[in-house]
Amino acid sequence: MIALKSKREIEIMRDASRIVAEVLNGLRTLCRSGITTKELDVYAEKIPAKYGATPAFKGYRGFPGALCASINQQVVHGIPGDYVLKDGDIVSMDYGVHYKGYYGDSAITVPIGRITPETAKLLKTTEECLYLGIDQMVPENHLSDLSRAIQNHAESKGFSLVKEFGGHGIGRNLHEDPMVLNYVTNGRGIKLRPGLVLAIEPMVNIGTDKVRILSDGWTVVTNDGKPSAHFEHTVAVTENGPEILTRME
Ligand code: MG
Ligand code: MG
């Protein structure tokens, strides 16, 4: 069942999403060679309290971190730990908060020092996929318009899309209907209407689209060990088009 949000609910989600954006902005500035992903997690866990918010992922189905920190060939759901970021790495940081009964959810992939041109192209393309998908979030469009925009762009650049994970509705729950695929299947999907709030999150790989989960039960990695990038925003469909609730200043 899809729960459309009232203007009042979207207001609260805007506030929740602003906290998410602030934390991700802070994390971006902390990201440098020599810092551990655990140190990033400490920051992500600490900041929401000053707003009366809580990190959304900590304890979610038993996830141990406040932040998902996924390095290089890790796609999503990386557990923060002792890994020390180094020049040439990319780190995907996926983060959400719970605030006044609602969730916000967003992700960025950040380069550490100098990265290869191909990896830089991966980051740029994945972020472009996110915004091309968001552009489709206008009333009367269908969900598949969004999926198609994401898939076409990634594949036109020679990259592949992770199929096992995708975006989702968001609101009173972190994950709500509908599921938002980053590739096209049969059918047009639901019609988009004002009040629909979605987390759009393309996960794009340089090589194979195939992924597996490490023995920690969480970390998703590419089968071929090549890099993967992830960008995400929480976005509301309004009469005037998409409103990116987690937009960063
Ligand atoms: Mg997320
Ligand atoms: Mg999400």
Image (cartoon, rainbow, N blue to C red):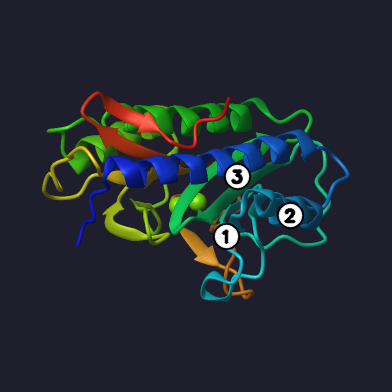
Where is the C terminus found, in terms of image quarters? top right
Residue 63 place in picture, x, y as percent: 59, 70
- Looking at the image, is mark 1 or mark 3 earlier in the sequence? 1
Residue type (three-letter) at the residue carrying disc 1: His
Sort mark 2 into few (<14), some (14-19) or many (20+) by Cα contacts within 10 Å: few
Q: Tell whether circle 3 marks a residue whose Cβ is less than 8 angstroms from ligand 1.
A: no
Determine if residue 175 is in view: yes
Q: Residue at x 24, y 55 (%)?
A: 3
- Looking at the image, is mark 1 or mark 2 earlier in the sequence? 2
Q: Residue at x 61, y 39 (%)?
A: 109
- Which is more foreground, mark 1 or mark 2? 2
Residue type (three-letter) at the residue carrying disc 3: Pro
Mark 3 lies on residue: 227
Relative to 20, 104 lies left or right: left
**SS of the residue under disc 1:** loop
Whole-angstrom CA distance, mark 2 to mark 3, is: 29 Å
Where is the N terminus found, in terms of image quarters? bottom left
Mark 2 lies on residue: 46
Residue 150 place in picture, x, y as percent: 34, 35
